[in-house]
Amino acid sequence: MDIEETRRKYKDIINLERPVHENDFFSAEHPKMDAMERAKIFAPFSALRGLNKTLNARIRIPKPANDLTPEREEEINRLLMNLSPGDIVTAIIRTPVQNDEGSDFFYERLTGAVAKIKPEEGYIQLISERIPLSNIYDISLS
């Protein structure tokens, strides 16, 4: 169920104020809590233990057989512009390295949740890692 569908379904109650219980035990014992305080209650809850660790896992991969075509670069750029925070992506990251034969690239597969996208600053931030856009060899929604 998407956000708009949820809003339509609960439109009659979603914007109602908290009920006021005057002169009763409930209101005295349970004063209204602001949204930030309520969020803190649920912050430590993790229904799927180990999910964040798995999502942030790095996996070394062999060098891809072919280089990026201009068409694939355009597809990647289009995907990057349509990403939203919270999307889960799998990216192949190409990092330049120096070796005995000169310079080469080190390839890794990284899966994680998008925290923010800053194309004007040249990076995408996954939950635990900032990736320069120039290092993205491939990316897809997971």
Image (tube, rainbow, N blue to C red):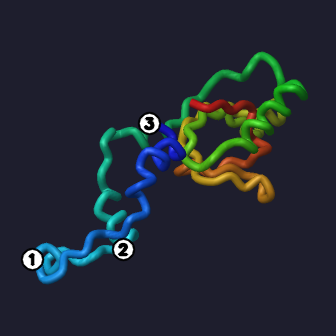
In the image, what residue occupies the spot 64% across and 34% down? Answer: 91
Q: In the rendered structure, find residue 34 and report the number of the disc placed on it.
A: 2
Cα separation, mark 3 vs mark 2, equals 33 Å
At label 3, the amino acid type is Thr
Dot 2, crowdedness within 10 Å: few (<14), some or many (≥20)?
A: few
Q: Secondary structure at mark 1?
A: helix
For mark 3, what is the residue?
54
Asked whether, in this view, residue 16 is left or right of residue 78, the answer is: left
Sooner in the amino-acid sequence: mark 3 or mark 2: 2
Quadrant assignment, res 58: top right
Depicted 67 relative to depicted 58: above or below? above
Q: Secondary structure at mark 3?
A: helix
Cα separation, mark 1 vs mark 2, equals 20 Å
At label 2, the amino acid type is Asp
Quadrant assignment, res 69: top right
- Which one is in front, 16 or 90? 16
- Which one is in front, 45 or 110? 45
Q: Nearer the viewer, mark 1 or mark 2?
A: 1
Q: How many numbered badges does the structure rendering display?
A: 3
At label 1, the amino acid type is Phe
Can residue 56 be spotted in the picture?
Answer: no
Question: For the C terminus, which image quadrant?
Answer: top right
